[in-house]
Every structure is written in C-alpha cells, then in structure tokens.
Image (cartoon, rainbow, N blue to C red):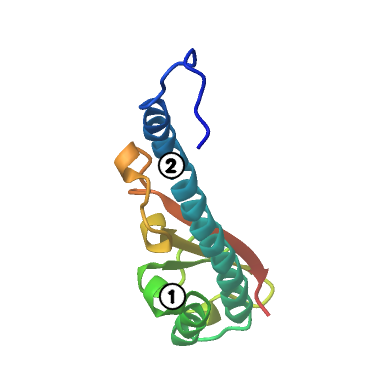
Amino acid sequence: MHRLPSNWPIRSGSTTLEALLVFPVLLIVVLGGVELGFLLQARHQLWGACREVGRRAALGHEPAQLQTTLEQYLGPGKSVDAELCLLDEQGRAVVRPAEIPPGASVTVLLRLPATSAAPDLLRWVGFSLQGQILEVQTVWRRE
C-alpha cells in the first residue's frame, strides 16, 4: 500500500465540505433545466394549439369544435386549465366565430397558468411559477 508523505496536510473533511457547498447549486441548475424544458414544451404546444384553433375559428367552426381541437393539442389535463378567448377586430369577446363577418379578423388568445404547464420545482429557493401565465395569440382573417 502506498503511503502519503508525512509532510502533506490532512484533509479529511474538505471533500465533504466541498460537496455540501456544490450540491445545492448543482441541484438548482438541474431542476431549473428540467422546469425550463417543461415550460418550453408547453409553450410549443400552446403555439400549435393557438394556430390550429385560429384556423378553425377563421373557418367559422363552433365553440365545441374549437374546444375539441384545444384538447387534442394540449391533452385533457392542460386544456381544462387553459383559457381560450376569441376577439373581433375591435377587441370585443366573441362566443361564436360565425358572428364575425367574412374578411374581418379574428384574434385567438390562449392562456395557461405556468403551474399547469410545469412542476414548480424551484419554489423552495424563491423562484416560483405561482401567478405566472403562458400566453400566445394569433390573428386570422375570417373566411
């Protein structure tokens, strides 16, 4: 067995101390990356859902069909928490896209609470998703 020279300092606890200092930072970075990945995936799903709902709204589909399209893109869990708003050219809320005259614009606004899109993994360090909203919008011409 190889022995260390007698003049080397003894460092029995330094490795443990370094690990205790680095581990929380590493944990925050990893959990932050996971949370960011979930948020980016949800944002991508929202853009796709908003685009498709907007296309169908421009064609004059009924609200039930728009909700079905939203469920197809977001899944049943996220679509329950999502808020879908249809607006006319003046920014007034519209219940049925068929109420908007052909040639006029229809705006689709889709909101989802961030806590529905991703787990709140960093709330224990003060970076919480509570109260944060993911929002996307698209504008189409009514056909």
Whether residue 102 sits left or right of residue 27 in the image: it is right
Residue 81 bears which disc, if any?
none
- What is the three-letter code of the residue carrying label 2? Ile
- Residue most toward the front? 1
User: In x, y percent, where is residue 23?
Assistant: 41, 39
Rendering quarter of residue 75: bottom left
Distance Cα–Cα, label 2 vs label 1: 44 Å
Of marks 2 and 1, the one in the foreground: 2
- Bin the neighbour count of mark 2 within 10 Å (Cα to Cα): few under 14, some 14-19, many 20 and up: some
Residue position for label 2: 28
Percent of width and height locating residue 58: 62, 77
Query: Toward the viewer: 138 or 101?
Result: 138
Q: Which mark is residue 95?
A: 1
Q: Where does the C terminus fall, quadrant-wise?
A: bottom right
Of 87 and 3, which appears nearest the observer? 3
Amino acid at the residue labelled 1: Val
> Which residue is painted at 42% across and 31% down in the image?
15
- What residue do we see at 55% from left, 59% from top? 136
Q: Do we see residue 90 in this rendering?
A: no
Name above or below for residue 45 compared with residue 62: above
- Residue 53, visible in the rendered structure: yes
Looking at the image, residue 131 sits to the left or right of residue 27; the answer is: left
